[in-house]
Amino acid sequence: MMSEILIPLIIFSCLFGIIYVYLSTRNKERLALIEKGADAKVFNSGKKYSFGEVVLNFALLAIGVGVGILVGALLGQAGMDSDVSFPACIFIFGGLGLTVSYFVNRKLNEKG
């Protein structure tokens, strides 16, 4: 009974700790750069993704996961152990969906 309460508490506290350390460290780095006289453009040097690219990535990932679940169910019906077929197919087809989204985004960036 106690583990049902402790496990989620430990997971969420670890996630909070990781996020807190990341954000506080990033803030300290930025303050140190500002004190040394660095330009503010250093903080905005990353590539900005458009809303369409993010939606395309999630859509193709969801399609890949859906196809993976379908193929995993078909393999489970064909006699393969469903404890193996579902996760394997989900990861394989989810990865294929992300790979397709990478190439589609690259193609769209070359056009535009």
Image: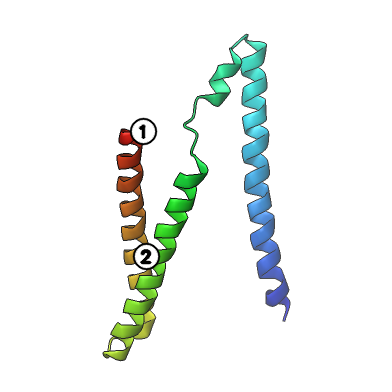
Q: Residue furthest front?
A: 112
Which residue is the site of mark 1?
112
Badge 1 element:
loop
- Indicate the colouring scheme: rainbow
Q: Residues within 10 Å of mark 2 (few under 14, many from 20)?
A: many
Instruction: Using the image as rendered, state which of residue 27 and residue 94 is in the foreground.
Output: 94
User: Which mark lies nearer to you, 2 or 1?
Assistant: 1
Q: Is residue 108 above or below residue 37?
A: below
Q: Amino acid at mark 2?
A: Gly
Question: Residue sitting at 31 percent across and 53 percent down?
Answer: 100
Left or right relative to 35: residue 81: left
Q: Residues within 10 Å of mark 1 (few under 14, many from 20)?
A: few
Question: Residue sitting at 62 percent across and 47 percent down?
Answer: 18
Q: Earlier in the sequence, mark 2 or mark 1?
A: 2
Q: Quadrant of residue 38?
A: top right
Instruction: Using the image as rendered, state which of residue 103 and residue 28 is in the foreground.
Output: 103
Badge 2 element:
helix
Instruction: Using the image as rendered, state which of residue 98 and residue 4 is in the foreground.
Output: 98
Quarter of the image for the C terminus: give it.
Answer: top left
Quarter of the image for the N terminus: give it.
Answer: bottom right
Which residue is the site of mark 2?
64
Point out residue 89 in the picture as x, y percentages from the top left corner: 33, 72
Left or right relative to 19: residue 110: left
Q: Residue furthest top?
A: 37
